[in-house]
Image (cartoon, rainbow, N blue to C red):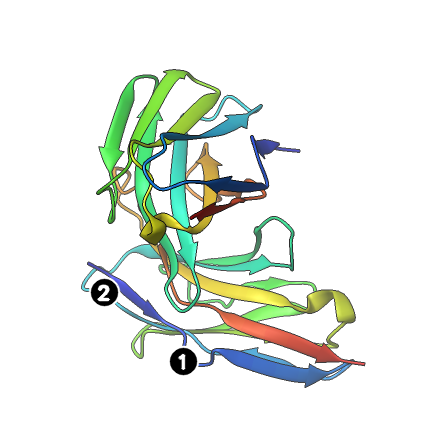
Amino acid sequence: DVKVTQSSRYLVKRTGEKVFLECVQDMDHENMFWYRQDPGLGLRLIYFSYDVKMKEKGDIPEGYSVSREKKERFSLILESASTNQTSMYLCATRRDIYEQYFGPGTRLTVT
Amino acid sequence: AQTVTQSQPEMSVQEAETVTLSCTYDTSESDYYLFWYKQPPSRQMILVIRQEAYKQQNATENRFSVNFQKAAKSFSLKISDSQLGDAAMYFCAYRSRWTGANNLFFGTGTRLTVIP
């Protein structure tokens, strides 16, 4: 079974803090994704990566950056957290043309 | 950009009954994939079923089946013999078949409640 893990299930940060969300997968998948999930808006793609050190912006990249130094790890960075970044963050991976595998999610609250 | 619409924010079904969740999408492409994902409360999102647009036959996975109407751009999910474990948020999603396409476009979700 594919395993996608995220560093925290719940996180509370203060406005202006730098926040790191980590995602690790164990199946050697090339593609990794960061989504944001908000009620009534579904899932929206923030960034994705198709290889080590390669990244592309998704639909809502503003206020975020990413890092992929190793194939198994994809980090989402909030340079200066703001209250409108309070959300559920989902990491996903994909190897073939079909299925994406999701992590359990990190519920981030910025106060 | 492609859009995916789920017009039912919430649905409920009696245990052992059948329920259909609706999804429509907008695209100018002729070849693509459609998916239904399930997100149980506090649990990971998992794939329920997928459909390739070039296949006319509707996909089926055990109690889950789809009604794919390509001309109408409709992709509904039917759950038969509903079980308590089917209670979840269900998301419809679209992806282009073009190999470079990485984005999965999601609908806003339908919360399904199963009544014992």
| Earlier-in-chain disc, 1 versus 2 | 1
Kindly identify the residue that appears in the image at 81 percent across and 81 percent down.
B116
Q: Are marks 1 and 2 in contact (CB under 8 Å)?
A: no
Mark 1 closeness class: few <14, some 14–19, many ≥20 residues within 10 Å: some
Q: Is residue B25 above or below residue A108?
A: below
- Amino acid marked by disc 2: Thr
| Residue B11 in view in this figure | yes
Kindly identify the residue that appears in the image at 40 percent across and 80 percent down.
B7
Residue A89, how many percent across, how many down? 45, 45
Indicate the chain on which mark 2 is placed.
B
Q: Is residue A13 above or below residue A86?
A: above
Residue B35, how many percent across, how many down? 46, 58
Residue B66, how many percent across, how many down? 52, 70
Kindly identify the residue that appears in the image at 63 percent across and 83 percent down.
B12
Numbered mark located on residue B7 in the image: 1
Q: In 3D space, how far apart are the residues under numbered discs 1 and 2 (Cα atoms)? A: 17 Å
- The answer to which quarter of the image holds residue B54 is bottom left
In the rendered image, the quadrant that contains the N terminus of chain A is top right
Most foreground residue, A23 or B60: A23
Indicate the chain on which mark 1 is placed.
B
| Residue B104 in view in this figure | no
- The answer to which quarter of the image holds residue B13 is bottom right
Q: Is residue A85 left or right of residue B58?
A: left
Q: Is residue B1 above or below residue A9?
A: below
Are labels 1 and 2 assigned to the same chain?
A: yes
Q: Is residue B98 left or right of residue B17?
A: left
Residue ID for mark 2: B27
Which secondary structure lies at badge 2?
Answer: loop
- Residue lying farthest to the right in this orientation: B116
Q: Is residue B28 left or right of residue A34?
A: left
Residue depth check, mark 1 versus mark 2: number of the one nearer the observer: 1
- Amino acid marked by disc 1: Ser
